[in-house]
Amino acid sequence: MHFQIPAPSMMELAAAFLQAAVTLGLAGLFFFLYTRYRKPYFGWFALAWLLYALRVGAIVSFLLSQKYLWLYWHQVVTGLTAVALLWASLVFSQQLRFRLRYLLVLLFPPLWSYVAIYRMENFLLAAAPAVVFLSGATLWTGWTFLRYHQRVRS
């Protein structure tokens, strides 16, 4: 299977590198907050932003090389980013504690990514679930902070 994706322009590459740099900065900020305050959700947000930066690197690597292994890893890391973002917001809002059975969720991104990249013929159908999952996790996180703001006015 081969998706027809054009090579990125220099402006698109520059924008991707800027996005990766800003995202790494966010990961560093949350890591600093975690080391200073020892709140678990800061650590999870740091991981989520680090994964997001890796996601940008994976898609740039795919666009430059056209090697489908990079597209596979982009899809996997997109799913893991969504899981980390969701988990961070749940730990923040509900102080959830980790349970071993939650590890099953981590199986979805690599399994779906394999099907999407190596078995499906339509790129949009292959990519849509990962985009919807990450968008949903982002919306859930925003909703969590909005509810928190309404409760404590902070």
Image (spheres, grey):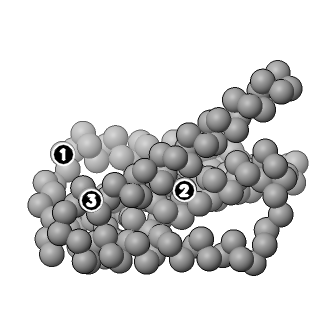
Q: Residue at x 78, y 47 (%)?
A: 92
N-terminal of the two: label 2 or label 1?
A: 1
Q: Decide if residue 57 is in sight here.
A: no
**In the figure, residue 81 lies in which quadrant?**
bottom right
Q: Secondary structure at mark 1?
A: loop
- Which residue is more in the foreground, 47 or 109? 109
* Label 1–label 3 contact, CB within 8 A: no
Image coordinates for residue 10, horizontal then vertical, percent: 21, 44
Disc 3 residue crowd, few under 14, some 14–19, many 20+, Cα 10 Å:
few
Quarter holding the N terminus is bottom left
Residue type pointed to by label 1: Ser
**In the figure, residue 130 lies in which quadrant?**
bottom left
Looking at the rendered image, the disc whose residue lies closer to the viewer, 1 or 3, is: 3
Looking at the rendered image, the disc whose residue lies closer to the viewer, 2 or 1, is: 2
Alpha carbon separation for disc pair 1 and 3: 25 Å
Q: Where 129 sits versus 14, above or below? A: below
Would you say 126 lies left or right of 110 here?
left
N-terminal of the two: label 1 or label 3?
A: 1
Image coordinates for residue 52, horizontal then vertical, percent: 50, 54
Q: Residue at x 77, y 26 (%)?
A: 149
Report which residue position mark 2 lands on: 82
Residue type pointed to by label 2: Ala
- Which residue is more in the foreground, 112 or 30? 112
Q: Secondary structure at mark 3?
A: helix
N-terminal of the two: label 3 or label 2?
A: 2
Report which residue position mark 3 lands on: 125
Q: Residue at x 78, y 32 (%)?
A: 148
Would you say 75 lies left or right of 109 here?
left
Quarter holding the C terminus is top right
Residue type pointed to by label 3: Leu
Q: Which mark is residue 25?
A: none
Report which residue position mark 1 lands on: 9
